[in-house]
Amino acid sequence: MNDILIKDIKSSFITKFATEPVLVFSPGRINLIGEHTDYNNGFVFPAAIDKGIVTAIQKSEKSVCSVVAGDMNEEFYFSLDTIQPIKNGDWKNFILGVVSEIQKKGKRLGNFNLVFGGDIPSGSGLSSSAAIENSVVFGLNEVFDLGLTKKEMIFISQKAEHNYVGVKCGIMDQYASMFGIKDSALLLDCKSLEASPYLINFGEYQLLLINTNVKHSLAESAYNDRRSVCEKVARILNIPTLREASESDLQRITSKISTEDYQKALYIIQENNRVLLAAKAIKENAILTLGSLLYQSHDGLQNQYQVSCPELDFLTNEAKNEPAVIGARMMGGGFGGCTINLIKKDAIKEFIEKTSSSYKEKFNLDCTPLHISLSRGTHVL
């Protein structure tokens, strides 16, 4: 956790509002495997990380709420009586959405002051949005004693994303950020919301993220498009979600859907299975099997689900050509963000140097290695 960030956010709040705040840390997340399966009620394998959002919050005597985005040096004010989404409101809609969803649950809020900032790189696919949402709902729950459970809080965060940001996300990001366990990843069933922690210790190997430093504009619309394809195929199969589908089920309706839609649905079914195989591999310490599953996941995301991009494919191919890397894939919604790599610890420095150089040569752009530790979920500091 970033002690300098915590100190900065706290001092900014005290300087501006002259009161002691409640401080909340809400982490970003990685996902070992299981991409786009969450909104299909499937399985995912996320973990909270030591990078995230720090929020300082306290009640206000004024007639409006004041919110300061420390990173961007921006602030805005709003009334609790007239909340609605702001067109092109970016980060503001995360805050407004959470407040609105709390109000919809019949909880009474008073005016408040809030300052937040983070150390999650923008557009990296590490779920800074879920971290912001969770930190705000958690902080408001503390300050106004709302009596919300953590499970209620993650659904408030998710609905804020759906209704105010316009991204029909699944529950994985909010869940991992809220419920993360130090040094562990969570095998999460997105249908039952039951999670099993798996201690992550890969011996001579460790996880390394490489940020492409790109976020293509396709990302949000493509995300919602993929979701609607999955829902359409599930309707044709007469099942609630693709979680309930098998490959043989899909075979029966090939005449009713396009080849592209067939491949997208097939990817979801296969990726769900890969998550369960990955959990088994970790339990049995079958590290090479886990690595192979990561490569298979990327292949499916690139060629079947079609949410990758040249930069992500390049970094994954670079990893494949390096014997010290036994698995890699794009991570997150797609069209940019990070790759996740399972690499021998003693080869990290050389791999970073070599990959950074070839990436720069190919795209005239720097990629950024990100070293992460697995963290506990949203909590008061």
Image: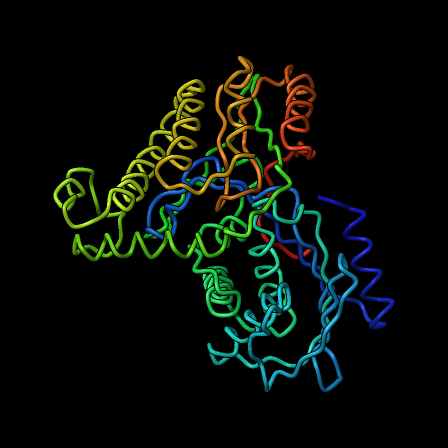
> Residue 136: x percent and y percent?
62, 64
Q: Looking at the image, how many numbered discs can be counted on the residues? A: 0
Residue at far top of view: 323
Kindly identify the residue that appears in the image at 87 percent across and 67 percent down: 15
Is the image coloured rainbow, by chain, by secondary structure, or in one colour? Answer: rainbow
Instruction: Tell me the quarter of the picture where residue 250 sits.
Output: top left
Residue pictured at 53% horizontal, 70% vertical? 147
Please identify the quarter of the rendering in which residue 302 is found: top left
Position of residue 242 in the picture relative to residue 199 (left or right): left
**Is 50 positioned to the left or the right of 196 in the image?**
right
Quarter of the image that includes the C terminus: bottom right
The picture places residue 87, in percent across and down from the top left corner, at 58, 72
> Looking at the picture, does residue 8 appear above or below residue 371?
below
Q: Is residue 196 left or right of residue 354?
A: left
Quadrant into which the N terminus falls: top right
Q: Against 220, is 338 above or below?
A: above
276 or 381, nearer to the observer? 276
Classify 184 as above or below 36.
above
Q: Position of residue 301 (x, y in %)?
A: 41, 37
Q: Nearer the viewer, residue 11 or 119?
A: 119
Residue closer to the observer: 58 or 124: 124
Residue at image coords 55%, 19%? 203
Residue 37, percent from left and from top: 37, 46
